[in-house]
Image (tube, coloured by chain):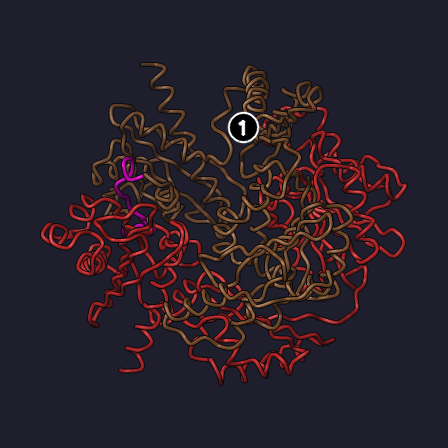
Chain colours: A brown, B red
Amino acid sequence: MNAEIIAVGSELLLGQIVNTNARFLSQQLAGLGIDVYFHTVVGDNPDRLKSAIEIAEKRSDVIIFTGGLGPTKDDLTKETIARHLGTDLTMDEAALVSIELFFKRTNRVMTENNRKQALILKGSLVLPNDHGMAPGMVYQGGSHTYMLLPGPPKELEPMFLKYGGPALAGFGGSGEQIVSRVLRFFGIGEAALETDVLDLIEAQSNPTIAPLAGDGEVTLRLTAKHKDVASAQAMLDDVEAKIRARVGEFLYGYNNSSLLEELTKVLKKKKLTVTAAESLTGGLFQQEITSISGASSVFKGGVVCYSNEIKEKVVGVRPETLAAHGAVSEECARELAVNAARIFGADIGISFTGVAGPDELEGKPVGTVYIGISVAGLPVMVEKLSLSGTREANRGRAVKFGCYYLLKYLKESQDAG
Amino acid sequence: MNAEIIAVGSELLLGQIVNTNARFLSQQLAGLGIDVYFHTVVGDNPDRLKSAIEIAEKRSDVIIFTGGLGPTKDDLTKETIARHLGTDLTMDEAALVSIELFFKRTNRVMTENNRKQALILKGSLVLPNDHGMAPGMVYQGGSHTYMLLPGPPKELEPMFLKYGGPALAGFGGSGEQIVSRVLRFFGIGEAALETDVLDLIEAQSNPTIAPLAGDGEVTLRLTAKHKDVASAQAMLDDVEAKIRARVGEFLYGYNNSSLLEELTKVLKKKKLTVTAAESLTGGLFQQEITSISGASSVFKGGVVCYSNEIKEKVVGVRPETLAAHGAVSEECARELAVNAARIFGADIGISFTGVAGPDELEGKPVGTVYIGISVAGLPVMVEKLSLSGTREANRGRAVKFGCYYLLKYLKESQDAG
């Protein structure tokens, strides 16, 4: 069984928003053993939507539509599909009651166009919307399964997890499970990695091995197909062992893990806490670590010291240091890391200072970054980077390198001890 | 002239990454007066890529491919297009030299598969890659223009801006410009907004008016077509004035602006500085404000106070406050805002404390948020929210509401004064 995801919305074609729903649904469908061969995006235009449906019917078994279920005039997914399939739209009373309750609960006045959201394809299975108004639906027409989901991710995601996925499983499938595992590497380039494992990539068809580079990381995606999940996992274990034997030193994690999640795990295991003094990164390290549920056991707080005044008065960097070396310097990074650890009572202090861009600073070029790492009982370490991306990319990359260096330092000191 | 964007990469179909290139290119193409009617995503599979090309040739003038130009075995965009068009691939000497230099500069060893990246469609215009190795290209075949761009956004974006866009302009176009303007609203629902302006939406075909909701905001996208940009702008001005007369009180900004950017503008104008004490949001407010280039004139630094210990010892919240009311309380939000402003020497202190989820805290439900706002010379204000999203959504929403309340407070105090 294979699927196609058709996103409906001119805002996507104008670049106003990005199609994150396609990513979410693709991940989910892979887990259900359903291959996704195409994503399509089409505007709020009935003729072009109709042509996209016709193309999808020729090449896909399951067609999932996202968006265009809202109350406004340009929301026309249901209407176009109904006309194409020659079926009627009927009012779903349960959905209508749910919409009326939504307005009562939020103390707002329900306008007439909101009733339209309760219309469904006659004969379809309704997928309740627990986080919004427009219900989703699944319709079986001939050999095709049509699923309609609302556009907002905060409505679509819980709806698919709770109702849509199980409904699809009910409609059947090949019975073959697709199991993927992503190996994450840092510190090695894509081509070098591929050269090291090329014979493995070429020899394998199940599991497949696919490299991907991005944001300073390289990943290898291993994908196995088997009727039985445990057997598919065993196939992945086998390939992973072969890859590890070649490039295991650069492997830091799996799947959607991040360097920060790995760091959090290691800190938890070692019962260490970390704080940060962030200039260049403006709070990104702290924002990312606190976005990990349960981070509170390793992170209590930290400081954003954007100006030199704050570096001096709040974080206690010596005026002489700033005068002699500037804020973008090894010396400043060192004092920030050490002082932050003391002020916030943490075992580890990490600091980020540098030139994010677009303009150079203190005569230092854009992309110059110093990362200070102070670990209780170990010598203070400062690493210098020369990054070459945009402002946002440089900030993100700096945080990744910070995690990478800290993880490496903790590992080396453990190995040495 | 209309265009279709075909992204090539199984990683997109497996949900490993999201198609941000389609958004970027769509925005750029609109600016060039080129309508985008379809986005397609297809995997690293020659047969399915060929079928996607055939479909695109039937409905689109310009076909832009992203991805699949890299050094590895599953990068096959060029090869598939060459076979489909019956043209050859030839080695581009300039691109090869550039790749060799890239390896020299980064002190890495060039592996043989990297040479493949310098192959181009014979007769195409080469688009140099200033931020990576694989060059892009533009090929004119019959009535179609084929553009091939590398997948990594940090290579694709500068390449399109510097070489790809100008090359397309050279290949001609309708001469008609598409000018878009997005009006951004906060504090009003999508259906209510549409009801208020429905007659305008229905009466207009050029400019068009399209509503879109997301993340607690509603936008109206106005799009005008005219041979002359100034005339198109005047058409947009006219429609905007009509909309403002109805719902102007909820309008806060334009296009890709954000509440934080609006706040930054207002603070700059009033020569005020802001600091933050963030618990719930873990540094998100500070990370976002420092991602705005030039924020340093309004933001000097702030604190992330994730644990009660840091709230007390570093930000000076009274132990009695925490004991009597807890950290998720009006009283704590008030002290955090006032104390942060004092410690960081800022005119304004804003604080975020609450329950991000997934678990409740201090017996308070997930989504409970207190935002404290302390403005020099004005009474301290605390707003309470009850949000209903995921952990990440609640953090993001809290920051938006913080900006919204602060903007409103500054405006009201100015109007009153």
Residue B403 visible within the image:
yes
Residue range corresponding to the magenta coloring? A295-310
**Residue B335: x %, y % from top left:** 18, 58
On whether residue B126 falls in the magenta region, the answer is no
Q: Which residue is found at the position 80% from the left and 45% from the top?
A: B51
Type of amino acid at the residue the image marks with label 1: Leu
Q: Nearer the viewer, residue B73 or A77?
A: A77
Query: Can you name the residue that lies furthest to the left here?
Result: B320
**Quarter location, residue B82:** top right
Examine the rendered structure and indicate whether residue B180 appears above or below residue B305. Answer: below
Q: Which residue does the numbered mark 1 point to in the structure image? A: A183
Identify the subunit bearing mark 1.
A
Q: Which residue is found at the position 46% from the left and 63% from the top?
A: B258
Examine the rendered structure and indicate whether residue A220 appears above or below residue B65. Answer: above
Q: Is residue A101 left or right of residue B65?
A: left
Residue A326 visible within the image:
no
**Residue B107: x %, y % from top left:** 59, 27
Q: In the rendered image, which quarter contains the C terminus of chain B?
A: bottom left
